[in-house]
Image: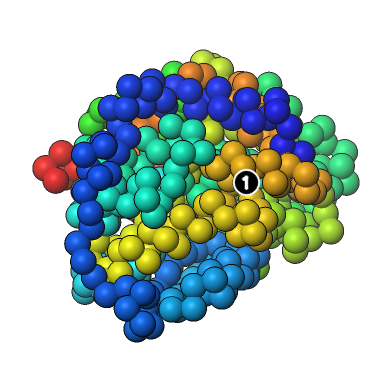
Amino acid sequence: MLNKKTITGVSLALTMLLSACSNGANEPSKESSASQPAASPSADSGKKVELRMSWWGSDERHEKTQKVIELFEQKNPGVKITGEYSGFDGYMDKLNTQIAAGNAPDLIQMGGNIKEYVDKKALLDLTPYVGNVLVLDDFNGGYVKAATFEEKLYGVTLGVSSTALMYNASMFEKAGVPLPTDTWTYEDFKTSTTQIAQKLGKGHYGSYDLSSDAASLASYLGSNGKELYRDGERHFDSQDMINWFTMWDELRKAGAIVPADVQVANPPTAVDKSLIVKGQVAIQSMSASQIFGFQELTQDKLALSMYPNGSAGSGMVPPISGQFITSYEGTKHPEEVAKFINFMVNDPEAGVILGSTRGVPPAGKIRDVLSAQSTPVDKVLYDYISLVSDTAPAVEYQQFPLDNEFIKLLQLTSEKIAFGAQPIDSSVNEFMTELDKLLVKAKAQ
């Protein structure tokens, strides 16, 4: 249940994001809000307005988003919205191709890489619609700030969440291995994953290979007093990456993590292929809000844990706005787009349908409605968000500016090592060289 303590915890964790908002410096300006959008064909003209909306996620998210679209269409008979949805793999590649071709969807679900697409001038400035079509009065100012750049609003938060280690508690119990705690360390992680693999036998693993997972790496660096990125620079060195890949290589050789060929065939991001729901892998990394889609597919008990602690303590960052609904800059129907965005985040019926499929809802009135209908899985998510809010150091997370390219580089490096195609030292040298090129490229944009 989302009680007052939980809500307070989330709010406090995001307070660090609000200081600038308190004087309105990063909120849509009154001048901009008062200006009117350019005229465009609208549903009021009697002509059918057709929109396209793209998003990624689990089957549960697809079904609930489609129901919200249908509800909106019932209440707005002049508008038709066609959904374009998929898993996350390939989503950004397809979007990039659509943007390059000038035919991107009118409505686009975006992740923490929203700034990258603002810099590409691919997203619509929603500022002219705030206060009239798009109402954000019930939003924490930090949520608004997260999608505001140079005093222009480019997206609306769909939910607040945090990255997490999702674990199969049933596998831990079956193996007789203690469950993760708030204070567990990387040594504990290595011991637990190795014991689970050994005790459950062939075809069972303590964890997915997370050496290619950017969130896991960022938390590892933070727990050792380093940072992935801040203010245009990386804040780690080659030895940190050698240590990172060596840890996973040792686990791989011990049979504690999923072999490279098995992981390629059963990627952790594909819910329907996930080995954690099949009871073969005990741990994987993901956005905490995704637990709903995984839990639906297994009778095993799933739970959430923070990443392990390192020599500098916890590397967790406070919960953030992880997913946004945005609009393509080239849409011909900006007002209808803004109207649907408002419906998605503020309409109580829509809020009940969507639940927490994209994280804890940003509007207070929607959270109040959901708090009376929480399920055991809701409680797992809400308790985890509260735990991270209370535990994470007071740091403001900065997204790597070319996030998609960074993720691909990390994955390529991980696979070279995991498949035995290249030693760790030379792989890290190439990784650092290419990473620095990305930073130079980002500064030039």
- Front residue of 400/134: it is 134
Mark 1, Cα crowd under 10 Å, few <14 / some 14-19 / many 20+, is: many
**Left or right of 196 in this view: 105:** left
Q: What colour scheme does the image use?
A: rainbow
Direction from residue 29 to residue 420 in the image, left or right = right
For residue 138, side relative to residue 199 (left or right): left
Residue at x 54% of width, y 42% of height: 362
Q: How many marks?
A: 1
Q: In this picture, is 169 found above or below 296?
A: above
Looking at the image, can residue 198 be seen? no
Between 153 and 161, the one lying in front of the other is 153
Q: Secondary structure at mark 1?
A: helix
At 68% from the left edge and 34% from the top edge, which residue is drawn? 384
Residue that extends furthest to the bottom in the rendered view of this protein: 47
Quarter of the image with the N terminus in it: top right
At x 70%, y 47%, the residue is: 370
When the figure is inspected, residue 383 is found, relative to residue 395, above or below; the finding is: below
Residue 341 visible = yes
Q: Position of residue 428 (x, y in %)?
A: 34, 40
Residue 345 coordinates in the image, percent (x, y): 52, 52
- State the image coordinates of residue 441 (x, y, percent, origin top left): 16, 45
| Residue that label 1 marks | 366
The three-letter amino acid code for the residue at tag 1 is: Ile
> Relative to residue 392, is residue 249 depicted above or below?
below
Image position of 415 (left or right of 274): left
Q: Quadrant of residue 186?
A: top right
Q: Residue at x 26, y 37 (%)?
A: 30
In the image shown, does 220 or 245 lie closer to the viewer? 220
User: Which residue is at the front of the view, 79 or 233?
Assistant: 79
- Name, please, the residue furthest toward the left: 444
Residue 413: image x %, image y %? 38, 49
| Relative vertical location of residue 304 with respect to residue 224 in this rendering, above or below | below
